[in-house]
Amino acid sequence: MVLTQHINRILTMGRLLGASGSGAELAPLVAHERATRAVLVVDIVESVRLVEHAELSVISRWLGFVDFIKKQILPAQDGRLVKKTGDGLLIDFSDARRAISTALAIQRESIRLNVGLRPPEWIMLRMGLELCEILIDDGDIHGHGVNLAARLMGLANPGEIVASQSVRDNLTADLDAEVEDLGDCFLRHVSQPVRAYRIGPPGARAVIQPALSLQDWTPSIAVIPFDCRASDRGHQVVGEIFAEQLIRVLSQSPELSVVSRLSTTALRGRSEALRDIVSHLRADYVLSGSYRYDGETLVVEIELADAKSERVLWTDLVRGGLSDLLDQDQNLTNSIATKVIVVVSASELRRLRSQSLPTLGAYTLLMSAITLMHRLSKQDFDEAGRLLQILIDRATRQPIPHAWLANWHVLRVQQGWSVDESEDTYLALESTRRALDSDPDCSLALAVDGFVHTNLVKKLDVAQDRYKLALETNPSNALAWALQGALNAFTDKGSQAVNNTQRALKLTPLDPHRYFYDSLAASACIAACDYASALELARRSLRANRKHTSTLRVMSVAQWHLGLRKDARATAKELLRLEPTLTVTRWLKRTPSAPYRVGQEFARVLRKVGIPN
């Protein structure tokens, strides 16, 4: 490990800790002995980042703390330090209660590691604990239980302890520790789910903090009522109306958290500096501006600023009548809000590329990953998967990144980029299971699990149940409506498919990934034999993203049925350029629509337009 290399190098140079390495080791147990022991794995969270930031400080603090554990904590509990792993420890005990007492003592004493330091410099620990039979060999320990303790440690957030069922069975709740059931958890490289428990000190307090909501993972924006620059201050109410309209429209976007109108109204007409506005409203972005209205023409100057850097990201000048502002279809405010969302997404992506990962907030990683995933460029797509995994490593129990990672695996197969579709299927299922383990009512996770069961597992009844649950939890979940529509399209339920996907389109007027919804709506129209609408939607989807292979397939079928045979063949040629290994047989193997009329018709047309059989 990286920290191990640093420690060995520094100790070799003789720069640190003569005393830390001294002291009598507890006698090793008999070699090759089998015994039931409680195994505790301790790990430093983000050790690589900490060492890069302050190498000597981190290593000296850690080695000093290890020495304290060995001399002050372990002897009282008959614990044995099996080995140091550089950025962690492996310890074993004769029974589970002693192990829990030690883990809680380490957790309690670790606070002193961070006294007087800023949060980015804190050394945070997480621990995993298993009670099992192990093999003891020359003082080291081996066996499945050791690996399981390490996997359980991976479920813990910074400062937390996670234990197995066997450990829980040896504890008296509220006396030995506070115990909270995490349910059956799926661990990496462990075939069956493992029952896991969060452990904390005994007492009346919650051990587990609830997972952050999706809103906590999205950037916040404050819309300040626009200032009236006209001599007639009687038109000041226009600024209030304009801000309220923008807040209402922006609130429809899942990409943003919008500060309430009542909160921002208090800042109307004040000449507050940007930093002061941010301190009051705790917003990441601020949308403000001014306007003039002479009774006929409304002239609006708009400014979007990054609250952290105090840099203006975007300005615009809009002209129109007051009727445009009050238009029921909100064309003016929709246009402005769409530009705002695009600029914010671009800003977060720039932040990702200009800063080191440890300094980035969760929403920057999440938004950047979603943006890169939907570009459908192979390089960007792979980077999106990497970012989601980093985010998951930081917040193991947060369901949203797990759900998006499952979505990533489905798109990987659909784009023809998977090197092993069975592996992608397994990993997608594992991701949605982890998400739903954390929050069984997460509407996004339920919808994506339906997506996985539709497109990869081909269990359409399970998928339908997932979409139903997702919509019961959140009736405004556009993704669930769209995916349910796709499922109905696959099974020849054209009219239902169109109704579902049209509902999704109404819910996503500002979604930066609208191309995906347009594509599914086009598929629904194919199932309903409305080829003209399918072609229109496919063209709109491709204008936004020309690399979506599913849209190209839909377009070629629509063009063929409309008698545009030359265009259909040209579309198929472009499809093969993006997915050169595509054949009709391979497509039928992976599409859920294969047994149905619509799937067979797709296959027939794909052969006609030039896709190899």
Image: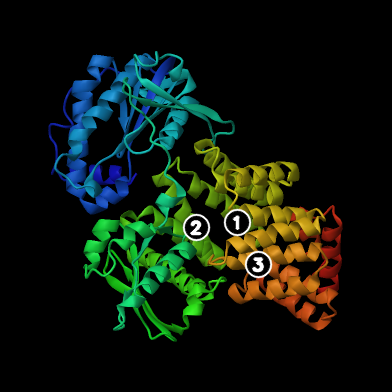
Q: Which residue is mark 3?
A: 518
First in sequence, mark 2 or 3: give its number: 2
Image location (x, y in percent) of residue 128: 39, 29
Q: Give percent across and percent down for residue 270.
A: 23, 68
- The image shows residue 589, relative to residue 464, as above or below, that is below
**Three-letter residue code for mark 3:** Asp
Q: Tags 2 and 1 in contact by the CB under 8 Å rule?
A: yes
What is the image's colouring? rainbow
Q: Which residue is mark 1?
A: 478
Which quarter of the image is occupied by the N terminus?
top left
In the rendered view, would you say 145 is above or below 120? above
Q: What label sits on residue 254 in the rendered view?
A: 2
Which image quadrant for residue 76?
A: top left
In-image side of 166 versus 68 (left or right): right
Near mark 3 (Cα within 10 A), the count class, few <14, some 14-19 or many ≥20, is: many
Q: Secondary structure at mark 3?
A: helix
Circle 1 Cα neighbour tier, 10 Å, few/some/many (<14 / 14–19 / ≥20):
many
Q: Is residue 184 above or below residue 47?
A: above
Which residue is nearer to you in this view: 120 or 450? 450
Amino acid found under the numbered disc labelled 1? Ala
Mark 1, secondary structure of its residue: helix
Q: Nearer the viewer, residue 278 or 608?
A: 278
Question: Residue at the location (24% across, 42% down)?
Answer: 8
Q: Is residue 230 visible?
A: yes
Q: Earlier in the sequence, mark 3 or mark 1?
A: 1
Residue at image location 57% in from the left, 67% down from the top: 509
Q: Gap in Å between the C-alphas at discs 2 and 1?
A: 10 Å
